[in-house]
Image: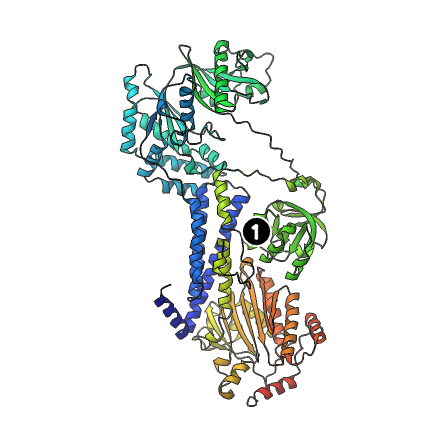
Amino acid sequence: MPLLTRVKDLLHQLLLPSLFIHEKYQAFKDLLGYDRTSHELIAELESIYHDQKKVDFCAIVRKYRSLSQSALDIISCLQAMAPLSYRGLGRRFKEIDSIIQRQFTPSKTESSAPFVLAIDEIRPGMGSLVGGKAGNLAALLQELHLPAPKGFAITTNAFNAVCESNQLRPAIDARLADLDIESATSLESSSRELIELFRSATIPPSVAKALTRITSWMRDNPATSRRVCVRSSATGEDASGLSFAGQYQSVLNVDEKGLASAYKEVIASKYSPRALYYRVNHGLLDCETPMAVLVVEMIEAMVSGVLYTRNPVNPDSDTIMIYATGGLGERLVGGSVAPDVLEISRGDNPQVVRSVPARNGFSPTSPGEALTRPISPDAKPSGAIHLDQDRARQLAVWAQQLEAYFQGPQDIEWCMDRAGSLFILQCRPLLIEAPTGEPSSCPLLDIPNEVLLAAGEKAASGIGVGKVFKVLQPSDLKRVPLDSVLVAPTTSPHLVQVIDRLRAVVTDVGSTAGHFASIARESGIPTLVNTKVATEVLRENELVTVYADGCKVFAGIVEPFITETHTRKFQPSDHSARRKLAAILETISPLNLIDPQSPNFSPEHCQTVHDIIRFAHEKAVQEMFFLSGKRGMKLKGARRLISHIPILLYVLDLGQGIREQARGVQEVHPEDIRNVPFLAIWKGLSHPDIYWSPEIVHFDWETFDSMSGGIISLESPLLASYALFSQDYLNFSVHFGYHFVVVDCLCGPTSSMNYVFFHFKGGGAAPENKRLRVEFVESILKEHGFEVRLMGDVIDAQLQRVPAATLEEKLDMLGRLLGCTRLLDMVLKDEDAVNTLAAEFLKGNYRLSPIETEQVRIQRRYFHRQV
């Protein structure tokens, strides 16, 4: 931030404090919104990874860019709240962001020549340039000298040139980011739009010129048919663990004039619905599969077919399978005709061991089905076997050569022309799927165990079995047994401390976007949140089975689930999208900044995006915490609150905190206020059992003492308490004599955002008496679920992520606590008195302060001019 801007902000803060507070509150309000958005985006990215959702990597890029912008907005809001502080946070975020951005940087794409290569020009190692299909065809021609059609490859460089010259990449990425492959409508509409991009594209002149030059062989070579087949040869196709078989389009019988149009149809088929589904489902990036195209001469086929070098039905058998049909093989691979089936032995002298002609009335959906479907006794052959035994044996010899060369089972397409010559059209790895070995599912209706809880939301999937252990306050964390099912009111980040001891977590409230939910997913701990009643219905030490995916908790051990507790539903894919997302999440999700009191709680120690967000949120709340302190005095627009409680209090409306009809007056009453947290505290302060002497006015006695020997008006704003509020936010700075209280609270409809921070300090009695009062307050707060930190005569306490109704109850309690302890330090003598009075408070007895005459005596002693 430039120096001039910093000076301007400082002057603004000092000279226009009321305006500064309004702007600070607005920045805080915006920060909370960005914080919520950030956690939702982190949860979405984690869910994509851990639940193995099938999305294109472009969707991940888009979500992260939204997260990055949200984090920058959070930092900007924090800097607006505290212009001279946290200057290193933005710099640290840029360093973290740069690590993540490396995962989004695509490999350098080449869009220059060569745009075409003749088959005999293709060499080993050119797979990224010509694709798997063209590379394999070149290998069997050049290395094995097997017969194959003549032709050439249009390289991936040409594809990149088409995309670059037509500026297609931004439009492609935008559509892929919106793609939902589980929705037929989304798949179809996205595919239609993407295909149209390529159909409307113009082939760059340099690529068109190269095509014209290479196709001269179609005109000049009388040995060719002058018709070609234009086929896909995408990078990775037919050369990796994924075959892409049948996913892309082929265009047959193309003449020279139609080549450019056919080429665009084939590269457009990269985005056909089935090709999109296949690629995204297997976690491949779009940039990993640039489309090369194989152009080969058309062969007028008498017979065509498919050959498997291993029996696809019985991989352990030692035979070769050949499937044959008359004419072109497109009908066979498309499953529209029944093939002849020949089973050939392996070895130097292969023999036909079985032949089955195509049968009437049956067209298998796959070649393998011809071997598994029984033949009816009265089924008649449709004719002679299309392929004679000599040619079948020749194909078997070539098959073994190809299998040896490519070092694995092969899926081979072949044909025979009218002269009886055999040709290999393509060769790719034959994929044989291993059994999944997954346990059988267990219908929930068949489970005899009692359902103890059926509610909430899954924050992390899985099944966990263990004994219930309740964590109702931070000190309980020290006693969490190994293999527990932890039950707690909220998903506090502090639970991270014991996560390696847990089998599952169930909470009353919480969110999939919370800090702990992120850690639970990362750690694989089944987590069920927002059940509302877990701490009430689940009993300590009770053995339970938590089925997070079904949002249920069962009594005892659910036997059919036992094996599933050690079995993943899905085996993670090791393809690029998942690997990249895993690397990205390592720099997004882990939460290292847990304890705000630690010296490591600083921008320099932020290691992840989550750390940045956590740090900024914590510091923003701290900035708001003492908003109505000394800097808040003499606030323009603040109005005196008139009530039956003798407290000098001014209120400042930050927006929608005061009813419309009271906005023009200088003095307001409690009934004019709309702020929910303030009304809840005021309800507690106004409890009928709390006595307020009309002779005592509560204000800042310490400041009164220090101002000119006490010569100051008792109604001066310098002595007042302040309440700054909107409709759901409250910052309440209260002076009761010599002690000071701050309550900072957000109480809205979103439980995960709600909190109350409480600060209690000072007193007018001796140090020992002040310490005893602090212990009294501490015991009450802990009993009500607050996290409490004690330092001398200072208490800092907090309660977070609770529903608005619960928070209102706690604020009401705080009001009663403040009302009955305002002079309690004057009478507390020992620990027994603390315990006795705490028990009385919890029973509902709130008359714990000195009697009225003692109160008056105390105030007369301090302020002889008051009465």
Depth check: give the residue in front, 786 or 584: 584
| Element on which disc 1 rests | helix
Marks counted in the figure total 1
Q: Which residue is mark 1?
A: 519
Task: Reply above or below: 635 against 291.
Answer: below
Is residue 337 shown to the viewer in this render?
no
Residue 185: image location, x then y, percent: 46, 38
**Quadrant into which the C terminus falls:** bottom right
Task: Reply above or below: 307 against 207.
Answer: above
State the residue at coordinates (51%, 62%).
618
Is residue 154 shown to the viewer in this render?
yes
Would residue 478 appear left or right of 70 to someone viewing this image?
right
State the residue at coordinates (72%, 42%).
448
Would residue 585 appear left or right of 222 to someone viewing this image?
right
Q: Amino acid at mark 1?
A: Ile
**Quadrant into which the N terminus falls:** bottom left
Residue 301: image location, x then y, percent: 41, 15
Categorize mark 1 by other alpha carbons within 10 Å: few (<14), some (14-19), many (20+): many
Residue 98: image location, x then y, percent: 42, 50
Task: Reply above or below: 461 against 592.
Answer: above
Task: Reply above or below: 784 against 236.
Answer: below
Image coloring type: rainbow
Residue 318: image location, x then y, percent: 58, 18
